[in-house]
Image (cartoon, rainbow, N blue to C red):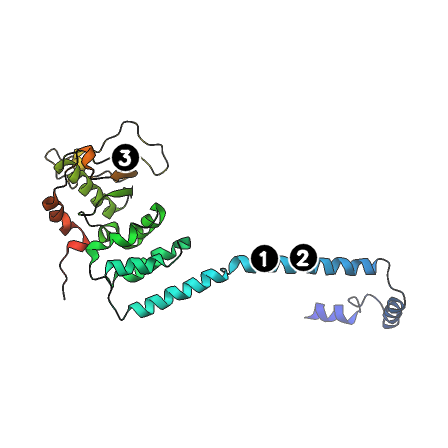
Amino acid sequence: GGRLGALMGSGALNGLGNSEMKEEVDEGKSKPKSGTLSSLADVASTALSVKKRSEAMAAALYPPKPYVFVYYKLIELQVCIAATYLTAKQAAYIVKKFPNQDFLRVHAAIACFGRIVDLENFHEVFDTFDIVERNELFHRLGVMNCINPVYFDRIYDIDLRVWDQRQLVRVIAKLAVEEPGEHFPKMECRWTQTSDPIPGWSLPVTWMYNEGEEAAGTGGVREQGALMVEFVTDARRGCVPDWKFRKSLNTRFFCGRKATG
């Protein structure tokens, strides 16, 4: 406190006396400094540039108007659907009205899922999706909650790190063993998510078992990597569906569980 008071009292912070400061100010008013006009122009240009950058950043942060419109329609769907029930065919009709950008159709399908009375036909909703949308839907709802083994023909992009997707692989392996014919026109397995496909790879029979369930204790699906399978039931490839066996697999899926409560 003493040092600050002494500094203020000595006038060291003033730099100049009052009279000298007044002369400097008066001189500054009467004689504009050189380059003042160009400096003002530079400031104005900089301010305009900053404004444009700010507007661009704001536009990037906020979604476009069409997205906002569709998002509010999605909220309306969530509110309205809480008081009604739908068939899978009706849900598919609603979902198709949404654009496929930004997983909006996936959001609509999820909103409808809990109100569908015939979930065994839920494939009617997601079979119109592209593979990216379908993977997102399976990720959010769980693949075993979406699939019906009776309507099984499609491409599956499987992440072997995920428990329920490994259960789907077990079903694929069981169908390959129980039903005659060549069900897999295309199949690729990778040891990791980013590695190249393994040349000459085929689906191991032991993958139809639970971990350690097979006689030699080698059962179970690999828990790392990725598997892409196209499953078809095509008579031209010698495939003969065993509908009784497929229906027996229903209990492994949500659509085959009995309602409680």
Toward which corner of the image does residue 102 lie, by quadrant?
bottom left
Q: Which residue is mark 1?
A: 56
**The N terminus: image quadrant:** bottom right
Residue 159 visible to the viewer: no
Q: Which residue position holds label 3?
A: 187
Q: Is any atom of residue 156 visible in this view? A: yes
Quarter of the figure with residue 33:
bottom right
Give the residue at mark 2. Answer: 49
Which of 242/197 is in front? 242
Q: CA distance from mark 2 to mark 3?
A: 54 Å
Residue at image point 53% right, 57% down: 60
Residue furthest out toward the front: 236
- Mark 2–mark 1 distance (CA, rounded to whole Å): 11 Å
Which label's residue is closer to the chain start, 1 or 3?
A: 1
Kindly state the secondary structure of the residue where label 1 is placed.
Answer: helix
Q: Residues within 10 Å of mark 1 (few under 14, many from 20)?
A: few
Q: What amino acid type should be assigned to the residue bearing mark 3? A: Met
What is the three-letter code of the residue carrying label 2?
Answer: Ser
User: What element does badge 2 sit on?
Assistant: helix
Quadrant the C terminus occupies: bottom left
